[in-house]
Image (tube, rainbow, N blue to C red):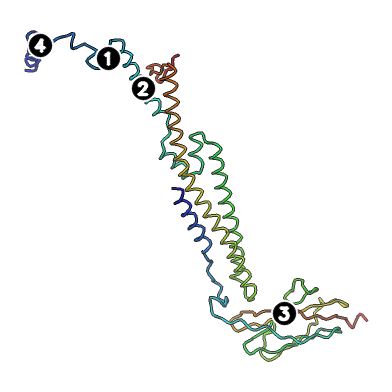
Amino acid sequence: MIRNLILISFILLLTSCALELERENPLDPISSGLAAPDKVIVYELPLTSEGSILLEWDIQNDAVGYRIYRSLSYDGNYQFITEKMTTDDGSYEDISDALVSENWYYYKISAINSNGLEGVRSEPLFTYFIDESTR
Amino acid sequence: MRRSLIYLSFMLVFCSLLWGDFDIEKFTDPAKYGWDSLEEYEGDRERKLLKRNIIHFYEMKNSNIYTNILRSAVFPGWGHFEVKQYTRGEILLGLEVIFLGTAFYYYNQAMEDYDKYKEASYINDINKYYDRAQDKYGISQTFLALGLLNWVYSMYDTALVTRQYNARLWEDLNRKYLEDNVELGFSSYPLGLQVRF
């Protein structure tokens, strides 16, 4: 009886570990077969940016738009700032009022395909922002 | 008609007694049943009556195995409490609460991450939330399986301890009332059992 109980418990534990949640997200590449856009290649930013911060990157063929994120630190939380729906313009000028002079700003950019699936974000790019009006 | 039949059968018995080979002494001889004397016969009769009372007492006090198993099926440990195995009952009940509580907690956490996974559009978030949800779901299922195992074992153990309890009860009754010369009888008023020393 004890041996049967041990066998049943082993089977139950194995079964419980093997149970999987369904991949219900329609954008999930594993279940939907969709390909995620490639990582965006962003050009290096100048060490100092005056007045505004200009971001430029290589256009991707399968991208219908790009999302731009900004942070105050390299490993910090990157906040979404804007989404640029374009297929032929790989640039964005950040002139937000939220930019504070004499501060480092870090950016990441990702591409979105026609299904709405966002690819891997780029490596962080950074620049030291100086507001011309405060000079 | 009935009266005639009764009268006839009485006459037949009476005649058989008168003219038959009926010996009253032989008929009442205690040695015929293995008793050496009338006192031995009376002692044996008393013992048999006492044993009958012990059986009745046992049947009143013993615990039904199947009822106890059902109790443990409803509430792990309940069957153990019924046969005074409080420590084992508390351990089994405590384990069941821990297993099911942990399973419920991790299931909730898994569903939160799963909801985030379903709403995510960023590829890294999709993978991250799915993996987190899957890990927590696996843990909850493992604890659920342990809870199920504990529940099954609780029922099995209830059967064991109930048998032990009943066996001990029987031994105690026999030792107490047969060996210690304690009388055990039934009284009509108040209705129930009497114990006399």
Amino acid type at circle 1 is Trp
Amino acid type at circle 4 is Asp
Mark toward the viewer: 4 or 3: 4
Residue at mark 3: A82
**Marks 3 and 4: in contact by CB < 8 Å?**
no
Amino acid type at circle 3 is Thr
- Residue B35 has which mark? 1
Image position of B18 with respect to A122: above or below: above
Mark toward the viewer: 1 or 4: 1
| First in sequence: mark 4 vs mark 2 | 4
Residue A79's spot in the image, x, y percent? 74, 74
Provide the secondary structure element on which disc 1 rests: loop
- Rendered image quadrant of residue B160: top left
Left or right placement of residue A53 versus residue A33 in this view:
right
- Residue B51 has which mark? 2
**Marks 4 and 1: in contact by CB < 8 Å?**
no
- Residue B21 has which mark? 4
Q: Residues within 10 Å of mark 1 (few under 14, many from 20)?
A: some
The subunit carrying tag 4 is B
Image position of B42 with respect to A70: above or below: above
